[in-house]
Image (spheres, helix red, strand yellow):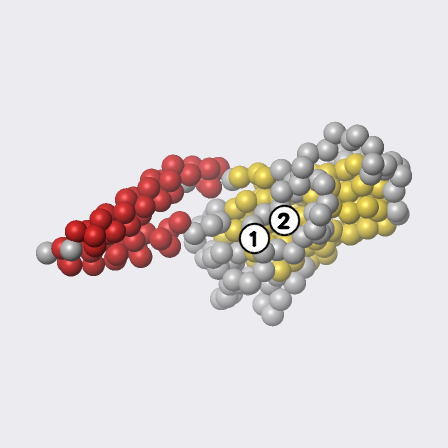
Amino acid sequence: MRKYRIVTMVLLIFILLPSLAIGTDMSVLPAFQIVTNNGAVGIYLLPTEPIKAWELKIVFNPEYIQVNNVAEGDFFKGYLTFFSPNVKIDNVNGTITNLYDLIMGLGNVTTDGCLINITFTAIDSPSISSIEIQDAGITNETKYLPLTTYDGRILTQGIDMNADAELPQYTPPSSGIPLIPSLPLSIPVQQTDSESSMTVPYLLLIAFVVVCILHIILIGKQQ
């Protein structure tokens, strides 16, 4: 009877563990850079599930940088895609809107890549401007998926890196996306509502798995 109980608990653990998978990361890369005149950033995605389409909005400080161009990245490379034909760059209010892309027909992507490339010009020095990802969403063939976003920072030439600037400490995501190392800036994490709402069930599942493991250990010691 004890052997059957152990087998049942092990099966439950293997069934529940996949639901504890970490969500997909969307990041501005480089996460930090110093710009003299012209520069560029990319919005990268590291998926944990198959991706069929994405959408997002970019917010920046128009007093410090002006966006010149937005181009489709290589995330959906090899597929026929429908990239937004009406991307709107607003250098007065500091936004890039109508950003989306999707695979036409069958197919999805599970490997990391660049969603869009953004080129810009620094118009003030010294200055600090954020590149923020807002209203972001990713989908498979049927539904939206959990997503965490990581913003970026741009410093135009002239910033005194030794000055006592009020800058947060940088903590990179654990996604494996290559970031510039050893830079003392912090990228705030923005969680989607769907991800935040699943926090409690995830903790309950983790607690259940831990209890099952401890129970198996105790049973083994009694035998």
In terms of image quadrants, where is residue 176?
A: bottom right
Say which residue label 1 marks. Answer: 175
Residue at the spot 55% in from the left edge and 63% down from the top edge = 111
Q: Position of residue 169 (x, y in %)?
A: 67, 37
Residue at the spot 73% in from the left edge and 45% down from the top edge = 183
Q: Nearer the viewer, residue 186 or 217?
A: 217
| Whether residue 3 is visible | yes
In the picture provided, is 60 more to the left or to the right than 202? right
Q: Amino acid at mark 1?
A: Ser
Q: Nearer the viewer, residue 187 or 53?
A: 187
| Whether residue 83 is visible | no
- Residue placed furthest toward the bottom: 78
Q: Position of residue 191 (x, y in %)?
A: 53, 39
In the picture provided, is 4 more to the left or to the right than 166? left
Mark 1 Cα-neighbour bin, 10 Å: few <14, some 14–19, many ≥20: some
Q: Position of residue 108 (x, y in %)?
A: 51, 63
Residue 77 drawn above or below residue 114: below
SS type, badge 1: loop
Residue 12 drawn above or below residue 169: below
Q: Reading the chain from its start, which is encountered first: label 2 or label 1?
A: 2
Q: CA distance from mark 2 to mark 1?
A: 10 Å
Residue at the spot 10% in from the left edge and 56% down from the top edge = 1
Say which residue label 2 marks. Answer: 27
Kindly indicate whether the residue at mark 1 contacts the one at mark 2 (C-beta within 8 angstroms): yes
- Residue placed furthest toward the left: 1
Q: Amino acid at mark 2?
A: Ser
Residue at the spot 15% in from the left edge and 55% down from the top edge = 223
Closest to the camera, between mark 2 and mark 1, is 1
Mark 2 Cα-neighbour bin, 10 Å: few <14, some 14–19, many ≥20: many
In the picture provided, is 81 more to the left or to the right than 162? left
Q: Position of residue 187 (x, y in %)?
A: 65, 40
In the picture provided, is 196 more to the left or to the right than 7? right
